[in-house]
């Protein structure tokens, strides 16, 4: 066992027109290699509801720039998970709806299926292949609803439930989607059959109780398993609400056998404690609310980069999440996506929200393990990770209004530091001897070894 104690002393920085304040007491940060928490699967974004078509409509040089911002570890966030939307509505539906691989009732639940495949899937195939070129290997396909003819309300929208007689056909439909992707050279690794099953929306949505979800898992699991795909469940609209779904699955040995990843969103409630399972858990969707486009790092709006950085930190450290998947990587209008696209002018803008994610995702790689990390200053939110290559990553989110310095970094070998705030996008910052300045209201990333 090794335990590294990193001592930091507050650094007094003179402000223009003001006298230099007195130095404050030292701050201690402990990183404990002997304390190991969850394994990390990665960080990602969603391409559901056809938003990636906005990117594909741009000139090729702009497309490449956005792909770099999402997936490059040198120029952008180095994302490692892509969440795809499985369509349920017929072709020709409105722009913000996804196209189904079986738009029409084939003649009943036991009739031979009549699948259709255009090799494009609302440009999601194009995006998945682009992600693969950057090294992305985790593709999470998720259905918001079954096709309307499989449901008791006859509509992919407005909630409704899957009819019992259609359960096997729906399971086959979902797995066929993964087979179409395999045909295109993309392996779907994780498959979800429901999105926010406890929320009725005017867009595609479908209701499951926790018990109903557990029962359907036992139908889907064998079919997905035979295709080499992991089942993910259940994307509840709040993390606390997801616990009931996890508990129902864990209480049924056959259902628990098939669910490899437990998922939850952060809208109704954020991750403040782990889900009740030993399986991996993902915070699989969240984005801040609001009605404006906000590019700022720290403006108190609840849409800024600082808000996203704290949400990622809390999901990892309080929720024990193995993955963090932000809702939208890009969209248009007054969006809270990472990137806003204007197809009329063929331009785009980048919010500091992207760089808040990038400060984590670029350096904490799939296969990393979270380590014990504490700070004596409650204003510092600290997390630490050991990557599979042996390197360690320490994330320090300074929520206070004063800078601090690490005045000694012992036993870690070569260190590099990066700053993310209003003026810096994961920008390298200098070490001073064996110390580094931790700026206030900012995220500092330290890579050791």
Image: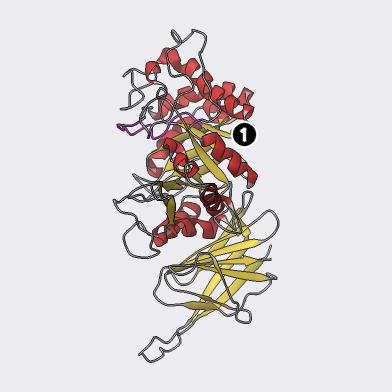
Q: Residue 318 in the image: state x and y as whole percent.
A: 46, 54
Q: Can see residue 139?
A: no
- Span colored in magenta: 192-203
* Nearer to me, 91 or 294: 91
Viewed as shown, does residue 145 lie left or right of 187?
A: left
* Nearer to me, 156 or 90: 90
Viewed as shown, does residue 205 lie left or right of 171?
A: left
Label 1: few (<14), some or many (≥20) within 10 Å?
A: some
Residue at image location 62% in from the left, 34% down from the top: 186
The residue singled out by tag 1 in the image is: 186
Viewed as shown, does residue 447 lie left or right of 288?
A: right
Viewed as shown, does residue 174 lie left or right of 298?
A: right
Q: Secondary structure at mark 1?
A: loop
Q: Can see residue 81?
A: yes
Task: Classify 377 as above or below 142.
Answer: below
Residue at image location 68% in from the left, 53% down from the top: 388
Q: Residue 5 in the image: state x and y as whole percent.
A: 60, 72
Q: Residue 350 in the image: state x and y as whole percent.
A: 44, 57
Q: Residue 169 in the image: state x and y as whole percent.
A: 49, 16
Tell me which secondary structure the magenta stretch mostly adopts.
Answer: loop
Give the residue furthest to the bottom: 19
């Amino acid at each position: 066992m090794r335990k590294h104690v990193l001592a930091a002393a507050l650094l007094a920085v003179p402000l223009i027109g003001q006298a230099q304040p007195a130095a404050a007491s030292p701050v201690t940060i402990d990183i404990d290699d002997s304390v190991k928490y969850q394994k990390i699967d990665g960080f990602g974004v969603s391409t559901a509801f056809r938003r990636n078509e906005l990117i594909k409509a741009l000139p090729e040089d702009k497309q490449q720039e956005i792909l770099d911002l999402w997936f490059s570890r040198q120029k952008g966030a180095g994302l490692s998970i892509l969440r795809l939307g499985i369509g349920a509505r017929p072709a020709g539906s409105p722009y913000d709806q996804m196209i189904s691989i079986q738009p029409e009732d084939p003649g009943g639940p036991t009739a031979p299926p009549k699948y259709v495949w255009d090799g494009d899937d609302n440009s999601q195939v194009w995006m998945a292949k682009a992600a693969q070129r950057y090294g992305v290997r985790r593709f999470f396909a998720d259905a918001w609803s079954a096709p309307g003819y499989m449901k008791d309300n006859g509509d992919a929208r407005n909630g409704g439930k899957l009819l019992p007689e259609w359960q096997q056909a729906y399971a086959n439909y979902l797995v066929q989607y993964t087979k179409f992707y395999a045909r295109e050279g993309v392996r779907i690794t994780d498959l979800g059959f429901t999105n926010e099953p406890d929320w009725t929306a005017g867009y595609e949505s479908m209701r499951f109780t926790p018990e109903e979800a557990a029962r359907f898992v036992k139908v889907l699991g064998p079919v997905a398993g035979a295709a080499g795909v992991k089942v993910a469940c259940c994307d509840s609209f709040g993390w606390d609400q997801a616990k009931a779904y996890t508990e129902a699955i864990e209480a049924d040995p056959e259902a628990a056998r098939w669910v490899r990843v437990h998922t939850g969103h952060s809208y109704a409630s954020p991750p403040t404690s782990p889900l009740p399972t030993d399986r991996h858990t993902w915070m699989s969707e969240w984005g801040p609310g609001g009605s404006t486009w906000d590019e700022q790092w720290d403006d108190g709006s609840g849409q800024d980069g600082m808000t996203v950085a704290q949400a990622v930190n809390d999901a990892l450290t309080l929720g024990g999440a193995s993955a963090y998947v932000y809702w939208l990587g890009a969209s248009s209008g007054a969006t809270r996506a990472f990137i806003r696209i204007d197809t009329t002018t063929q331009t785009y803008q980048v919010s500091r929200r992207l760089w808040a994610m990038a400060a984590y995702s670029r350096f904490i790689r799939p296969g990393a393990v979270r380590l014990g990390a504490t700070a004596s200053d409650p204003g510092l939110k600290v997390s630490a990770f050991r990557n599979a290559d042996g390197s360690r990553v320490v994330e320090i989110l300074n929520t206070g209004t004063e800078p601090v310095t690490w005045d000694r970094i012992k036993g870690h070998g070569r260190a590099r530091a990066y700053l993310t705030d209003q003026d810096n996008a994961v920008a390298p910052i200098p070490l001073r001897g064996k110390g580094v300045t931790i700026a206030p209201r900012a995220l500092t990333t330290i890579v050791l070894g």
